[in-house]
């Protein structure tokens, strides 16, 4: 999980989603988004798969996994486990695998096999370039010692309460030569009340900490912020429950200030949820209406834009929890519950359920179920930026007059207390901490600030450099080399980022590899040497990634 933003000058908010629910809602489908005429799909664009078709492809790939492992040159002790399958319009299939070695999971060993419609392998994208060879599988330190060191590391990083359920043996291939290691997941709470899922990787021979990343990922959203909207509900007796049967049965729950459990399913006797105004009452349904609206718009954005059927692309909805904790100024995505959770902000009257926050948080789930970008270093910055990029896409897609699309993150939730956004995509450094351009030190920043490089890239690719006004918001985007960049439009930029994420990025992708992944995506979608391909290259150069 990751919090909505970083705990430095501001509260922890990787992407808080402020939810302001307008008063409303009859049973029906969310209708705030304006439908656009469908364009002819590109040959390399993903095709929509039914849940049954996707399951069949996964089962076929798993049945052939041993042969695939031999074909791509893996060793005798290595096995492949299918994680995901993407099929393009032209029949190309991209199968994402996790790896095991001598029965142990290989962290950082994920790979993608690309095959044409005839089944012939066209290439392999690997997170780890090194061959998996480990001389000894006998650890020199105990699991108990690794667990103790992991708990100590969590306390150093600011965990208020820590728990650990033991360390498991793994192969660490995320950096350098693969080694036998322990993975310990430290639970409890972070110092701001955000649940803790710190993954600590410890060398099983030396006891040295090799890597760590936070498993809780956060964001921002609103009908406090989005006005009166239409939501789906399900009637049960004389009440209406906030369950969206049109979108994988997404449900919205009220935690009523608790910090654990699922909570109570939000229900109304009138089929109207919320009042459209902020309230400090934990029974208020406005935040729930915002959360449900954000979930619906995010589902529709992915379905309409990429043909993706839910966060896992399997037609199953996640669920949302509102009124988390007491005056909790954050929001987060948690893979372990497959759910989004929103705090009520300062004074319990500023829920983090705004539209871009909702889109941001659920996009963490999409990243987890595709590239699985490690939430640390440069890959962590790319993870956060991916959520900012798609959260922005959701906001533009919704086309809601109360919250028009923009390239600002968290502008509705006023985390800073002065009306300024949490982040700016056109010039990330305007927030006082984010990076406009890549440097060798970017990976050492908090992931919410190292994300600035990719956010800036996406803005330049979409809109270009220089001064302009979009939906009433003024932007002025600079470039590292002073060269002017011409944008290709947000629609194409989104397609390129999504294809790169789902078919070319791996858990360890850094900025240099992200450049390669997006160039590969642009080449597949629009052709090598196309205007779109050249624009991707120019936009990366403009943020000093070459």
Image (spheres, grey):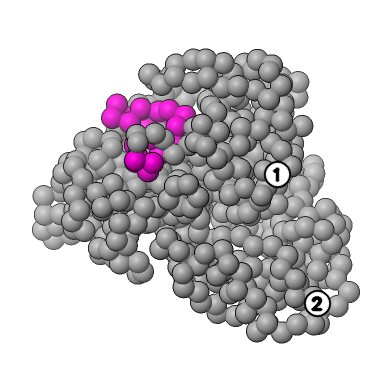
Q: Distance between the residues labelled 1 and 2?
A: 29 Å
Q: Is residue 351 left or right of residue 59?
A: left
| Residue at figure coordinates x 45%, y 52% from the top left | 12
Q: Is residue 125 visible?
A: yes
Residue located at (78% from left, 47% from top): 124
Percent position of residue 508, x then y: 70, 52
Residue depicted at 50% across the width and 74% down the height: 162
Disc on res. 441: 1
**Horizontally, is 501 left or right of 277 in the view?**
right
Residue 190 image position (x, y, % from top left) = 47, 64
Magenta stretch holds residue 64: no
Residue 395: quarter of image: top left
The residue that mark 2 highlights is: 205
Residue 61 versus residue 119 in the image, above or below: below
Q: Position of residue 196 (x, y in %)?
A: 49, 66
Q: Is residue 407 magenta?
A: yes
The dominant secondary structure in magenta is loop
Q: Which of 327 and 181 is in front in this view?
A: 327
Few, some or many residues within 10 Å of mark 2 (<14, 14–19, 20+): some
Magenta part of the protein: which range?
396-417
User: Which residue is found at the position 73% from the left and 65% from the top?
Assistant: 210
């Amino acid at each position: 999980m990751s919090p909505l933003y970083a705990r430095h000058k501001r509260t922890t908010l990787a992407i808080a989603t402020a939810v302001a629910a307008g008063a409303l809602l009859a049973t029906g489908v969310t209708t705030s988004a304006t439908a656009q005429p469908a364009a002819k799909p590109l040959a390399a664009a993903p095709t929509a798969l039914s849940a049954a078709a996707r399951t069949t492809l996964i089962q076929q790939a798993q049945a052939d996994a041993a042969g695939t492992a031999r074909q791509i040159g893996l060793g005798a002790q290595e096995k492949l486990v299918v994680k995901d399958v993407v099929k393009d319009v032209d029949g190309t299939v991209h199968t994402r695998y996790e790896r095991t070695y001598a029965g142990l999971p290989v962290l950082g060993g994920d790979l993608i096999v690309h095959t044409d419609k005839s089944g012939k392998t066209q290439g392999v994208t690997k997170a780890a370039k090194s061959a998996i060879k480990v001389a000894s599988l006998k650890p020199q330190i105990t699991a108990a010692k690794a667990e103790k060191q992991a708990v100590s590391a969590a306390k150093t990083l600011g965990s208020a309460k820590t728990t650990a359920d033991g360390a498991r043996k793994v192969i660490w291939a995320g950096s350098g030569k693969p080694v036998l290691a322990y993975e310990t997941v430290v639970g409890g709470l972070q110092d701001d009340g955000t649940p803790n899922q710190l993954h600590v990787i410890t060398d099983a021979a030396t006891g040295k900490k090799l890597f760590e990343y936070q498993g809780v990922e956060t964001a921002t959203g609103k009908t406090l912020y989005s006005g009166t909207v239409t939501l789906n509900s399900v009637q049960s007796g004389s009440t209406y429950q906030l369950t969206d049967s049109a979108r994988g049965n997404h449900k919205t729950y009220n935690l009523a200030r608790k910090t654990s459990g699922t909570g109570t399913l939000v229900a109304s006797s009138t089929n109207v949820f919320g009042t459209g105004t902020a309230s400090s009452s934990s029974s208020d349904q406005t935040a729930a209406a915002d959360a449900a609206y954000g979930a619906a718009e995010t589902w529709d954005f992915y379905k309409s834009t990429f043909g993706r059927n839910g966060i896992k692309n399997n037609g199953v909805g996640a669920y949302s929890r509102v009124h988390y904790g007491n005056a909790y100024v954050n929001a987060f995505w948690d893979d372990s519950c497959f759910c989004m959770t929103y705090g009520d902000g300062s004074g319990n009257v500023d829920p983090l359920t705004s539209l871009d926050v909702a889109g941001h948080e659920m996009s963490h789930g999409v990243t987890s179920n595709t590239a699985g970008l490690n939430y640390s270093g440069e890959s962590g910055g790319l993870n956060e930026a991916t959520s900012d990029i798609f959260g922005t896409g959701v906001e533009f897609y919704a086309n809601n007059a109360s919250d028009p699309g923009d390239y600002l993150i968290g502008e509705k939730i006023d985390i800073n207390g002065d009306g300024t956004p949490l982040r700016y995509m056109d010039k990330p450094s305007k927030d006082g901490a984010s990076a406009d351009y890549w440097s060798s030190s970017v990976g050492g920043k908090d992931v919410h600030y190292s994300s600035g490089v990719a956010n800036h890239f996406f803005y330049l690719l979409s809109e270009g450099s220089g001064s302009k006004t979009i939906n009433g918001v003024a932007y002025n985007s600079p470039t590292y080399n002073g060269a002017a960049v011409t944008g290709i439009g947000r629609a194409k930029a989104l397609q390129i980022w999504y294809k790169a994420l789902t078919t070319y990025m791996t858990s360890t992708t850094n900025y240099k590899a992200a450049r390669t992944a997006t160039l590969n995506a642009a080449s597949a979608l629009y052709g090598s040497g196309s205007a779109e391909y050249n624009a991707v290259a120019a936009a990366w150069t403009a943020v000093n990634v070459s």
